[in-house]
Image (tube, grey):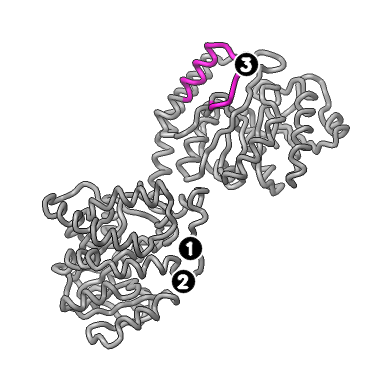
Amino acid sequence: MLLASQHGFVAVEPVLAELDEARRALAPSGLELSATFLGEPVDGTRPEQFAARLGLSLGRLTPSESGFAAALLEGFRAALDDHADVIVSLDADGQHDARQIPDLVRSHLAHGSGLTIGSRWTRGGSSPGTGPTRTALSRAGNGLVKAFTGARGVSDSTTSFRVYQPDVARLLLDERLPSETYGFFSAMVAVIQAHGFAVDEVPIVFRPRYSGGGQIEQHDLREFAASLPTVRRQVHGIRRDMRSNQALWAQRSPRLRAQAATGESLFGATDELTNLADADHFLTWICESLDSQLGARVLEVGAGVGAIATKLAALGHDVVAIEPADNVFPELQRRTAGNPRIEARKITSHDLLAEGSDASFDSVVYVSVLEHIRDDVEELRTAFHLVRPGGTVALFVPAMPSLYGSLDFKSGHFRRYDRSLLRQAITDAGFEVVDLHYMDVAGVVPYFVMYRLLDVPTLDAGSSKVYDSLIVPVSRFIQNHVAAPRVGKNLVAVARRPPHSSPPAS
């Protein structure tokens, strides 16, 4: 519990009395409340003595730097050092009713939020005593924050009455946020959301300060407005970073956390893998899209249960199908046994290279695999070694980061790609892009509805069959009449290792 005020601590004893009520309200839930004053009270009181009479744990921290934002960040460090389970901040000048803390904390824990805001402007909130000018400025400022930074679902982005998840507090210590108060709190919302944490609001009653004063000055407004373009650039940079590791973003979402796969050497979505292996129309479409760009000897990395390897072998390719997952390889081995064109091996591409398989293959194929690999560029550099000069690498990956949902997270996808992200990974690995296009236009909306809006946790056999028999034929028809669709559920890429080329440095 961090108590601070940009206008000094006034009427401390009423604030502490309300904190004590909050402490007693939280106790039956097994939650202990302790408070820290950031700074010095200005009314001549000794708050520690009064807190001791109440039985309230109260500490004092004198920040080493001036400014409200710096004081709060220093309070975060102290709370993290004390291993706080949640961190609450509020002004100590009476405008925040500490008796509302239990409502904020319980909502925060129930929703798994990264940040919970005590909001005067959300439905059910109020701000008695706030004049029309102050109200208009606050609402206009919140609108500017949303317009500039893309912050969503927040109606009161400048208030300091908040509950923080400890991971969020750590994150904010590493971010460069504006130093002025209003810009600091509004930037915090956009940055937290960009990193994937949920931001929720709980209605509060926002009261006039005990001492009055605290008017918004013109320099406050100027500094707030000046900070917005910088925050906008900062948020865009964070989103770019999150785009390449959407699994980290998903881990922070309470909506998706329950979908996480478990097991270091196991694949977490074996049922979905088996159902997709029976999607004959879809797999045939993938293989026919790649066939003309593949050489005679093909390495399939992450072969799963062998559905793609079997179809490539039927098209006349000799396939080495490698699959390292303990719970998948036996099925690959069973399905491909007796096929003279397929060699199944329980091994990774790196191990295969270590055996001395440099330039052993005409083509390397990744179908729904690259998204599972944290360092996709390094994996493609391994493929660069394994394929002969002039040979090709063929990729089929999930597309459109905006589609990332429950099934992606359960399946262990680090990312969904767009054209620029996939092209960058390919060229960074040393390949030249031959073809790069979207695939499965008709699959976009059903996927979005199922795995983003409805958060369906699995792909069952019935859904897979409907998709394969109805949606795939429609998508193929569209693709045949639209040469270069601008969207699609997947991306297909073919790249070539330049002749006489050397592998790029890692």
Q: Position of residue 155 (x, y in %)?
A: 50, 28
Give SS at disc 1: loop
Secondary structure beneath label 3: loop
Image quarter (top left, top right, bottom left or bottom right) of the C terminus: bottom left
Q: Is residue 64 left or right of residue 152?
A: right
Whether residue 393 appears in this view of the structure is: no
Q: Are marks 2 and 1 in contact (CB under 8 Å)?
A: yes
Q: Is residue 450 magenta?
A: no
Instruction: Inspect the image, locate mark 1, and give the three-letter code of the amino acid beneath it.
Output: Ala
- The type of residue carrying mark 2 is Leu
Residue 28 is situated, as x and y percent measured from the top left of the image, at 76, 44
Residue in the picture at 39% in, 61% down: 375
Tell me the residue at 30%/53% (across/down): 399
Q: Which residue is mark 2?
A: 266
Q: Is residue 129 magenta?
A: yes
Q: Residue furthest right?
A: 53
The secondary element bearing badge 2 is classed as loop
Q: Residue 136, image x and y in percent? A: 49, 15
Give 385 or 344, whichever is nearer the viewer. Answer: 344
Q: Amino acid at mark 3?
A: Pro
Q: Residue at x 38, y 62 (%)?
A: 460
Q: Which residue is mark 3?
A: 128
Number of the label disc, if any, that sits on residue 261:
1
Badge 3, how many Cα within 10 Å: few under 14, some, many 20+? few
State the extent of the magenta-drawn residues as a range. Answer: 122-142
- For residue 413, which quarter of the picture? bottom left
Using residue 159 as the reference point, say whether residue 49 is left or right of it: right
Label 2, label 1: how far apart the Cα atoms are? 9 Å
- Could you give the CA–CA distance between mark 3 and mark 1, rounded to whole angstroms? 48 Å
Residue 481 - label: none
Tag nearer the camera, 3 or 2: 3
